[in-house]
Amino acid sequence: MKSFVAFWKKDVVNKLIVVALFALAGGTLAFGLMLLNMPQGKSLADAFSNFIPVAPTSDVTAVPTANIGAFTTSTSAPNALPTATAVLLPIVDVPTFAPVLELTSTPALEASAEPPASPTQSAPSGATCVPTHPVQTGKVVEILDGNTVRVLIDKLVYVVRYTGVEAPKDKKYADAAKNENSKLVYGKEVTLVTDVSDKDSRGRLLRYVMQGNLFVNQKLIEQGLGSALDVPPDSACAAALNQAQQTASSASLGMWSANKAATAVP
């Protein structure tokens, strides 16, 4: 111990050597303790970070902003204070995205529900037999045969069968009836009137059809391009349609022309 004290007092260099030895011994001891107490799987750098404080970092992230001027400084004379000069950066157009709703038109589907009727209108005056029931109006978009059409009513398409009219069975006159039906109503606005039944057994709307003041059901029968068909309880116009058939038959029109040929004398 006396020799250590003598060594300590001998010279400043000796004092520095002693301090260095103590520091080295202390550091070695601390490093050993750190290794002994370091959890399994933890790196040496992580262990040092527990002993050495780390300056906190800011969580704020700088976001670049378009169209903001940058400032530069310049001096025009010695000892002059720097002046700020604004330099405008080019405008950057940042695209923005917004949802776009694309509207596409789709063909109207054939509807099975009953179309709405107008309670304020009655049938046109072209046929006195047509009931004064609320009517429906629409546009004929397709001719199916001599007594059936498709009608667009309030953006929905309905199959409409003419009440009291039976189309010809013979192909020749069936085609003629379809062509005449097309001339009368295709692409035109029509008025539809119900008798008693709303639909037939196949779900088609049963209607008296008016194009202006023209009673289409009766017109087809008058030309011999359909026959009267009375199916109660839809018989409001049965008498008028039967009379139209008698007129066409007597005149041998359309499908009734075969009767004239059969009775002709050679």
Image (cartoon, rainbow, N blue to C red):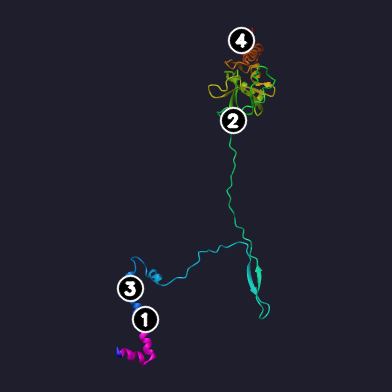
Q: Nearer the viewer, mark 3 or mark 2?
A: 3
Type of the residue with mark 4: Ala
Q: Secondary structure at mark 1?
A: helix
Q: Check residue 38 for magenta coloring.
A: no
The local crowd at label 4, few if under 14, some if 14 to 19, many if 20 or more residues have their Cα within 10 Å, is few
Type of the residue with mark 2: Val
- Name the N-terminal-most of marks 2 and 1: 1
Type of the residue with mark 3: Leu
Residue located beneath label 3 in the image: 33
Q: Secondary structure at mark 4?
A: helix
**Which residue shows up at 34% across the image and 77% down it?**
28
Residue located beneath label 2 in the image: 157
Q: Which mark is residue 262?
A: 4
Find the distance from the CA under tag 3 to the CA under tag 2.
90 Å
Q: Check residue 7 for magenta coloring.
A: yes
- Name the N-terminal-most of marks 4 and 1: 1
Type of the residue with mark 1: Ala
Q: Main secondary structure of the magenta part?
A: helix
Find the distance from the CA under tag 4 to the CA under tag 2.
43 Å
Find the distance from the CA under tag 2 to the CA under tag 1.
99 Å
The image position of residue 141, as x and y in percent, is 62, 29
Residue located beneath label 1 in the image: 23
